[in-house]
């Protein structure tokens, strides 16, 4: 299948126009007219991921985080990103990234988080105006808010998070005995939405990348927060896109990366 046909299928489902202006989404490296026989999904591309792709004969890497952000002054092997781009081009491997558009889109990262955690009655948390290039009458926005079928304590919810998402460690702000019936989710980094989540009736917000003073603000407002970690809240990206591409790309092999990209270790 041609790369341009694959990107078209992806963008029909997850339009690039939903991405924030500062973001860098779409085809970052590659030839639209190239043939693709094997695709690998992964949260982001680094040297280990590219080496894995070379070893496994991958033609296209689909990532959540774009590895090219901001200007690049030169592409040479003496620079980390330059070397990565050089290696990708040399081995005819394309990279396609879907970042904030995938966070915002329906059936994207936040929706899948809600689904695997079995949260019900999901709605958009932070609504944005419909993009004029993609207005289908639905309300788009970042984050989701939903309900538990039966209320549980915050500690029980944390145990489920660790089990379902295979998270080794969580940081929690609030009362572990608090009964939780309504949950807000912003994968990646989203502690700034805690106030909105509380206003919308959520008992807790699940997110990542929480700084000390942000946590203190959440504590002072009497809200509960679980810091799942940026990586751990978004590593399910490779599962979402594996499922989507496997269904959409007949005749193309789709695999999930086996490289461990979490830079943190728990000691």
Image: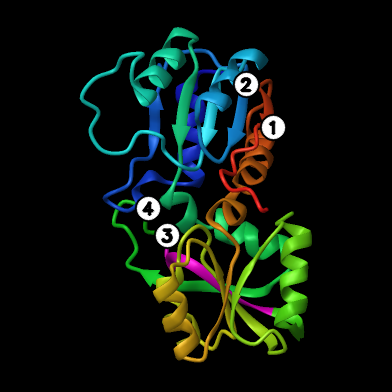
Question: Would you name the residue on which mark 4 appears?
Answer: 18
Q: What's the residue at 57%, 52% (across, down)?
A: 234
Q: Which residue is identified by label 1?
A: 258
At which x and y percent is residue 240? 64, 46
What separation in Å lies between label 1 and label 2 (alpha carbons)? Answer: 8 Å
Residue occupying image coordinates x 42% and y 21%: 84
Q: Which of marks 2 and 4 is nearer the N terminus?
A: 4
Front-most of residues 213 and 47: 213
Magenta stretch: dominant secondary structure: strand
Q: How crowded is mark 4: few (under 14 residues within 10 Å), some or many (20 or more)?
A: many
Q: Which range of residues does the magenta coloring cover?
A: 137-147
Residue 39 seen in the current view: yes
Q: Is mark 4 on a helix, strand or loop?
A: helix
Question: Closer to us: mark 3 or mark 1?
Answer: 1
Q: In this view, does 127 lie to the left or right of 70?
A: right
- Image location of residue 209, percent across then percent down: 48, 61
- Pointer 1 and pointer 2: residues touching (CB < 8 Å)? yes
Q: Earlier in the sequence, mark 1 or mark 2?
A: 2
Residue nearer the viewer, 104 or 154:
154
Determine if residue 107 is in view.
Answer: no
**Mark sitting on residue 125:** none
Q: Residue 136 carries which label?
A: 3
Q: Residue 52 carries which label?
A: 2
The residue most toward the top is 90
Image position of 135 (left or right of 103) = left
């Amino acid at each position: 299948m041609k790369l341009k046909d694959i990107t078209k299928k992806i963008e029909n489902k997850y339009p690039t126009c939903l991405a924030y202006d500062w973001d860098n989404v779409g085809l970052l490296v590659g030839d639209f007219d190239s043939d693709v026989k094997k695709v690998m999904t992964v949260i982001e591309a680094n040297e280990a991921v590219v080496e894995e792709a070379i070893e496994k004969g991958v033609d296209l890497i689909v990532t959540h985080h774009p590895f090219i952000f901001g200007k690049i002054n030169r592409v040479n092997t003496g620079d980390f990103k330059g070397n990565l781009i050089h290696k990708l081009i040399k081995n005819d491997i394309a990279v396609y990234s879907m970042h904030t558009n995938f966070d915002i889109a329906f059936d994207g990262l936040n929706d899948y988080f809600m689904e695997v955690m079995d949260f019900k009655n999901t709605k958009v948390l932070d609504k944005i105006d419909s993009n004029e290039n993609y207005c289908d009458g639905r309300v788009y926005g970042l984050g989701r808010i939903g309900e538990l079928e039966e209320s549980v304590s915050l500690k029980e919810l944390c145990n489920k998070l660790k089990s379902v998402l295979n998270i080794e460690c969580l940081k929690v702000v609030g009362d572990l005995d608090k009964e939780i019936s309504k949950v807000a989710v912003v994968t990646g980094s989203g502690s700034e939405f805690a106030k909105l989540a509380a206003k919308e009736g959520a008992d807790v917000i699940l997110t990542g990348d929480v700084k000390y003073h942000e946590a203190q603000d959440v504590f002072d407002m009497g809200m509960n927060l679980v810091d799942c970690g940026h990586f751990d809240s978004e590593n399910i990206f490779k599962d979402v896109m594996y499922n989507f591409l496997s269904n959409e790309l007949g005749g193309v092999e789709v695999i999930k990366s086996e490289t461990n990209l979490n830079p943190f270790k728990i000691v």
